[in-house]
Image (cartoon, rainbow, N blue to C red):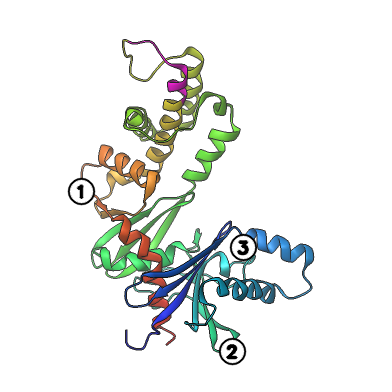
Amino acid sequence: MSSLPKQFVSCDWGTSNFRLRLIDTDSLDVVKEHKTNKGVKALYQEFSANSTSSQSQFFSEYLTKQLKEIDEERQSNYIVASGMASSSIGLQELSYAQMPIDAYGQNLFSKSITLEKDLSLVLVSGVKTKTDVMRGEEIQAVGLTDYLPIESKGILLLPGTHSKHITYEKGIFNDFKTFMTGEIFDLISSQSILSVSIQRASFDQKFKLAFVAGVKKGMEGNLSSSLFSIRAKDLMQNDYFERNESVDPQKVKIENYYFLSGLMIGEELTYLKEVEEHISMAANGVLGKLYRIALEEVMQKEIQFIEDEVLEKALLIGQRKVLNNYV
């Protein structure tokens, strides 16, 4: 890494959030961090309503202004930006790279843009197949390459609002699928008739039985009829397990919430029962815990669960690999 700068700025620009981090290149330690709620959607709306400058200039000016919050004395001359910054509503639209891609990031599509004197932005695009697209997860996947049996045949699961299942073999990411599990869950739980039959609550082990019951039911198919059973359980004040105890209506609603979560995740994971490939899963927090429970309950094989600290640095590792192509 002798050719790389001592520090670089990591820019993670999503639809609803913006994050800059000044990074020590060798250790990938975060020297300083700055966040705002100006994701590309909000900033694009501001640009559309008020700006007389070009879209690229408007976004660039916002980026350089925020940069002063973490690097006022210009310790770094490079910003690496991934995610929605390269979308049609971002700083500058870039075409998607076509799958397959090298698992080490050698053929990701990126572009170097001069923002100011001695300040370069390396903008990274997303990846596409004939039927699917992603922006941002490909950098995370490239960052996780060193922790996967990448020369073997496997599937990397990246759970989220739009979960990605990325397949690889012989050092190549060759395909992926997107599952709208998180978004559909949010829509059903907040806007459907089921919204009055569920109650959000922090995950606790006492809700594990309801969640696992949902996972198993989701893997049986018939998702639509299984969904309405949640409403029926609420109306009849039943629980899932025929326990000989009085039923707490609030507890039933919380169990319904985790049963619904299990249904959606189980439906997403169903096809994995038939695959022989190595399976890795990378997610942290409550989402990571739920996917881990689901996989451990239904898979009759060993699963690789990537550690939280590795996942936390995956984006930075991927961005550093991209930067290495420019310096």
**How far is disc 1 from disc 3 in space, using C-alphas?**
39 Å
Q: With 247 as the anchor, is 272 left or right in this view?
A: left
Q: In which quarter of the image is residue 210?
A: top left
Q: With 280 as the anchor, is 268 left or right in this view?
A: right
Return the mark for residue 302: 1
Total of numbered circles in the picture? Answer: 3
Which residue was labeled with disc 3?
Answer: 40
Q: What residue type is labelled 3?
A: Val
Q: Nearer the viewer, residue 63 or 162?
A: 63
Residue at x-position 47% and y-position 24%: 253
Q: Which label lies toward us, 1 or 3?
A: 3
Q: Which amino acid does label 1 sit on?
A: Glu
Which residue was labeled with disc 2?
Answer: 117
Q: Which label lies toward us, 1 or 2?
A: 2
Residue at x-position 67% and y-position 63%: 43
Disc 1 secondary structure class: loop
